[in-house]
Image (cartoon, rainbow, N blue to C red):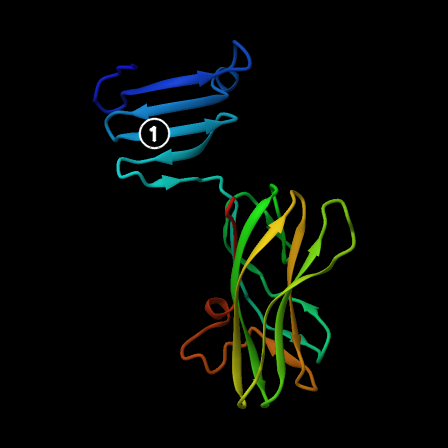
């Protein structure tokens, strides 16, 4: 039993050190329980990795998570897959895993990917699709990993596609979103037209985070 009292700042800790000098080295790993607020914290590499509050709610400030939004539109040709390059606004990027319209997996694991893209007005019978392009760690060559969503338009309006998929990635693998449209001519993505008061930013986004 570790007894520390119940006042503000009172906490009991267990430290794991890899050296005897230097505050970081002496507290490389740490498990602490703060009595006043009833919070248990876990540190790895002298950085807070997880906390559990009095209600049992768990937060992980280093858990890989990214949300990006469009800040422009993009014209894509008919047929073929075109990588999306409109992700100009990062609203969340826990560990700096997103850059140049590309997500890079920091660790090997299963990732949940969700998002939405809007397409400009196309005639009935046009095909629309979303897919993932994958670049293995250490490679400069990408390839189609899986299709995320597809549909054929039924009426002449602006369309929006949403997707939710679990993607298995190795550490260092890169992931891009690609689109495909078969209207017979060039079309735009990121338009958000005919979506009420929707804007490019709040109608075109991609979120991906580590499940485990």
For the image, the number of numbered tags is 1
Could you say whether the residue bearing mark 1 is in a helix, strand or loop?
Answer: strand
Q: Quadrant of the N terminus?
A: top left
Depth order, front residue of 209/61: 209
Residue at left offset 49%, top offset 25%: 46
Query: Could one spot residue 205 in this view of the protein?
Result: no
Query: Of all residues shown, which one is farthest toward the top?
Result: 20
Q: Position of residue 152 (x, y in %)?
A: 59, 82
The residue that mark 1 highlights is 40
Depth order, front residue of 111/176: 111
Packing grade of label 1 (10 A; few <14, some 14-19, many >=20) is many
Residue at left offset 44%, top offset 17%: 15
Q: Position of residue 62 (x, y in %)?
A: 49, 39
Left or right: residue 71 compared with residue 36: right
Depth order, front residue of 16/196: 16
Does residue 99 sit above or below 74 in this rendering?
Answer: above
Left or right: residue 141 compared with residue 89: right
Depth order, front residue of 7/125: 125
Residue at left offset 57%, top offset 85%: 153
Does residue 60 sit above or below 187 in this rendering?
Answer: above
Q: Position of residue 167 (x, y in %)?
A: 59, 54
Query: Of all residues shown, which one is farthest toward the left?
Result: 6
Q: Position of residue 142 (x, y in %)?
A: 75, 57
Query: Could one spot residue 87 in this view of the protein?
Result: yes
Quarter of the image where one finds residue 131: bottom right
Residue at left offset 70%, top offset 80%: 78
Does residue 181 sit above or below 19 in this rendering?
Answer: below
């Amino acid at each position: 039993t570790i007894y520390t009292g119940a006042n503000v700042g009172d906490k009991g800790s267990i430290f794991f050190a890899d050296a005897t000098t230097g505050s970081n080295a002496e507290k490389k790993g740490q498990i602490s329980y703060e009595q006043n607020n009833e919070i248990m914290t876990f540190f790895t590499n002298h950085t807070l990795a997880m906390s559990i509050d009095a209600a049992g709610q768990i937060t992980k400030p280093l858990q890989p998570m990214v949300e990006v939004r469009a800040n422009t539109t993009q014209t894509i040709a008919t047929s073929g897959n075109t990588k999306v390059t409109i992700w100009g606004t990062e609203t969340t990027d826990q560990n700096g895993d997103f850059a140049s319209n590309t997500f890079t997996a920091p660790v090997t694991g299963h990732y949940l990917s969700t998002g939405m893209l809007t397409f400009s007005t196309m005639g009935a019978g046009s095909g629309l699709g979303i897919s993932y392009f994958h670049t293995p760690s250490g490679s400069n060559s990408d390839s189609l990993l899986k299709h995320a969503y597809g549909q054929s338009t039924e009426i002449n309006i602006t369309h929006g596609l949403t997707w939710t998929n679990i993607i298995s990635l190795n550490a260092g693998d890169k992931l891009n979103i690609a689109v495909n449209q078969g209207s017979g001519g060039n079309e735009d993505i990121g338009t958000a037209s005919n979506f009420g008061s929707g804007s490019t930013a709040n109608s075109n986004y991609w979120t991906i985070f580590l499940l485990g």
